[in-house]
Amino acid sequence: MRAVRFDEFGPADVLGVREVPDPVPGPGQVLVRVTAIGVNYGETLIRSGRASAVVPWYDLAPGALGGEVVGVAADGRRLVGFALGEGYAELALLPQDATEVPDGVSDHEALALYLQGATAVTAADAVRLAAGERALVEAAGGGVGSLLVQVAARAGATVVAAARGGRKLDLARELGAHEVVDYGEPDWSAGVEPVDVVFSSVGGAVGRQSFELLRDGVGRLAVFGFASGEPLDVTASDVFRKGVAVLGFGNPLTPDVVRRVFDLGLRPVLGEALPLADAARAHELLEGRATTGKVVLVP
């Protein structure tokens, strides 16, 4: 089969298509012919060698990349799941209990809803988002952010969407945001009123400013990413000073959560669909913040 591999950490052009042996399913695994591959920002960190600096428990070597895929099993079922090993490939292994894609949901839509949708729903659960609260969503034009805007709005929260650039802010408004703010501006948070909840996926300076917007004594921040390449710079002393909670959460991809995501009828935002051979281009678009919505590769 054809698969995307890399022999050394570096820029996007270290990615290349190779002929590699077909995977062989083991107990509890199912082989699928891949029809679409989700591309995530975290995979650019792995490829560049920066993942371990942002997430210290990563200990990776150059080789293959994996993530969520949609594929067709031998019995004809169309399944979506997280690849067990190689994911940027024509064939992949999924858990035997991988989720069947509902009729009427395209491969691209399934990938836009699967991991990002589960993350959005689990983050909202973690902070116990309630009607009447103010919720700030970072990267509101991205895969998770665009779904969180919808989840938060449906919960009855006042949604403050933070993103970089007018196009993504316009999208956030369309999806239900009540206020928008461009964090491309250095003092973007100066005019934002305090919030009860922050959904933080950017890290670095943006994450720090978002944290300071939390309402003292009641604020909750759910952290699920570091798209800036820098971790959230918040100390225990900061948390103590403000009397707020900073929350992480475990694996969102439980069968119950995935079914909830598909049942919610959220509007997924679809980005570029590129051939497998253009994996490097997909990474360049993500790193250049030139995407809106889910980017996929098609073998």
Image (cartoon, helix red, strand yellow):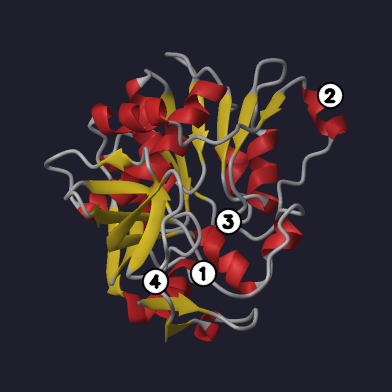
SS state under label 2: helix
Q: Nearer the viewer, residue 101 or 200?
A: 101
96 lies above or below 13: above
Q: Nearer the viewer, residue 90 or 119?
A: 90
Pinpoint residue 298: horizontal percent, then vertical percent. Answer: 27, 69
| Residue wearing tag 1 | 287
Pinpoint residue 49: horizontal percent, then vertical percent. Answer: 68, 71
Q: Nearer the viewer, residue 165 or 289?
A: 289
Residue at the image position 33 percent from the left and 43 percent from the top: 113
User: 10 Å neighbourhood of mark 3: few (<14), some, or many (≥20)?
Assistant: many
Give amino acid for label 1: Glu
User: 10 Å neighbourhood of mark 4: few (<14), some, or many (≥20)?
Assistant: some
Q: Are the residues at dot 1 and dot 2 in contact (C-beta closer than 8 Å)?
A: no
Give amino acid for label 3: Ala
What separation in Å lies between label 3 and label 2 (alpha carbons)?
Answer: 26 Å
| Residue wearing tag 4 | 22
Left or right: residue 141 versus residue 56 is left
| Residue wearing tag 3 | 227
